[in-house]
């Protein structure tokens, strides 16, 4: 990939999906690679866009699923530094505290950010309530069963498509018209305008 990058004169090469995490674990990429930083920035922009779109206040509590994962732990550092809203980190390591967090928030507006893994959202959806807005960053997008459960409980769900851009061949379905967050550029460092795409699913 480095050889190809030099051959075509590309300014940047990034990897998508599970590759960045695998490469970090094997010492091929640094602990906080560009893919991670790009995803954190994209998620922060997506949260801002979601708040504007839904009319939620910047102080609305945020529940982060997958909070101690590859992206989650770096995002938490930024959120804790900003300290604009209460943050509830949820992961396999503290999953038992999810119920306690939900009791504190029940009936109140809240954002649930899904950074976990495929299928994990299904375990939490049935505990949510009307007034909760879910922002999904996980590939693939929420399935029919998850969307049905959210619809029945009055939960709104938005999917983070990626950064507006063109790919060859284009990404299919819910990712059409976007570049994966981890494979995108940082604002001010790439060519063209930086715009995060979020799409309402429920």
Image (cartoon, rainbow, N blue to C red):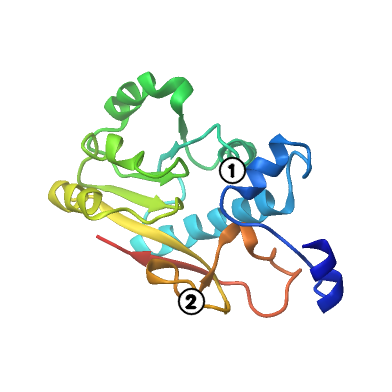
- Measuring from the top left, give residue 81's x and y in whole percent: 65, 38
Q: Residue at x 85, y 75 (%)?
A: 7
Q: Residue at x 73, y 36 (%)?
A: 26
Between residues 27 and 79, which one lies in front from this camera angle?
27
Q: Is residue 137 above or below residue 11?
A: above
Q: Are marks 2 and 1 in contact (CB under 8 Å)?
A: no
Of the image marks 2 and 1, the number of the one nearer the N terminus: 1
Residue, disc 1: 71
- Measuring from the top left, give residue 39's x and y in whole percent: 60, 54
The crowd level at tag 1 (other Cα within 10 Å; few <14, some 14-19, many 20+) is many
Residue 177: image tag: 2
Q: Residue at x 47, y 35 (%)?
A: 86
Residue located farthest toward the left when viewing the structure as drawn: 152
Q: Quadrant of residue 45?
A: bottom right
- Measuring from the top left, give residue 110's x and y in whole percent: 34, 43
Helix, strand or loop at mark 2: loop
Between residues 77 and 4, which one lies in front from this camera angle?
4
> How far apart are labels 2 and 1 at the CA level?
23 Å
Horizontally, residue 40 falls left or right of residue 110, namely: right
Horizontally, residue 128 falls left or right of residue 8, namely: left
Q: Quadrant of the N terminus?
A: bottom right
């Amino acid at each position: 990939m480095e050889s190809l990058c030099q051959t075509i004169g590309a300014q940047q090469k990034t990897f998508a999906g599970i590759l960045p995490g695998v490469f970090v674990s094997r010492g091929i990429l640094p602990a906080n690679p560009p893919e991670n930083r790009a995803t954190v920035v994209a998620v922060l922009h997506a949260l801002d866009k979601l708040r504007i779109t839904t009319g939620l206040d910047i102080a609305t509590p945020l529940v982060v699923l997958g909070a101690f994962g590859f992206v989650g732990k770096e995002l938490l550092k930024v959120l804790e530094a900003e300290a604009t809203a209460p943050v509830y980190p949820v992961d396999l390591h503290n999953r038992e505290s999810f119920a306690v967090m939900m009791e504190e928030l029940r009936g109140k507006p809240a954002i649930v950010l899904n950074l976990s893994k495929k299928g994990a959202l299904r375990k939490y959806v049935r505990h949510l309530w009307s007034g909760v807005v879910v922002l999904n960053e996980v590939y693939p997008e929420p399935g029919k069963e998850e969307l049905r459960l959210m619809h029945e409980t009055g939960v709104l769900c938005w999917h983070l498509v990626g950064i507006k851009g063109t790919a060859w061949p284009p990404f299919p379905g819910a990712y059409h018209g976007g570049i994966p967050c981890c494979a995108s550029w940082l604002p001010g460092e790439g060519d063209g305008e930086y715009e995060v795409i979020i799409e309402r699913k429920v």
